[in-house]
């Protein structure tokens, strides 16, 4: 992440609904059931909403719709 594209905790908290306790990292990328933080560390997304749980994150078919 460059400084220009970096996401801060403050910015993240402004746009994400507070329905779960926040993770200790800010996810910046997602694919399938995986998410990545700004340092490139990979996590399994256990807190995704109903659509993410059923469909995954960034599935190409749904991105084209």
Image: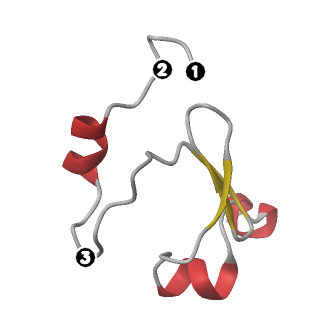
- Is 55 located above or below residue 28 in the figure? below
Foreground: disc 2 or disc 3: 3
User: Disc 3 marks which residue?
Assistant: 19
Disc assigned to residue 12:
none
User: Disc 2 marks which residue?
Assistant: 5
Label 3: which secondary element: loop
Q: Earlier in the sequence, mark 2 or mark 3?
A: 2
Q: Are marks 2 and 3 in contact (CB under 8 Å)?
A: no
Q: Earlier in the sequence, mark 1 or mark 3?
A: 1
Q: Locate the N terminus by quadrant.
A: top right
Which residue is at 61% across, 31% downward?
39
Foreground: disc 1 or disc 2: 1
In the figure, is residue 11 to the left or right of 55?
Answer: left
Residue 30 vs residue 58, the one in the foreground: 30
Within 10 angstroms of label 1, few (less than 14), some, or many (20 or more) residues? few
Which residue is at 54% across, 82% downward?
51
Which residue is at 54% across, 13% downward?
2
Within 10 angstroms of label 3, few (less than 14), some, or many (20 or more) residues? few
User: Disc 1 marks which residue?
Assistant: 1
């Amino acid at each position: 992440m460059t400084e220009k594209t970096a996401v801060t905790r403050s910015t993240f908290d402004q746009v994400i609904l507070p329905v779960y306790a926040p993770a200790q990292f800010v996810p910046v990328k997602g694919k399938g059931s995986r998410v990545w933080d700004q340092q490139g560390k990979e996590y399994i997304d256990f807190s995704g909403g109903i659509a993410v749980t059923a469909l995954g994150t960034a599935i190409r078919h749904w991105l084209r719709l």
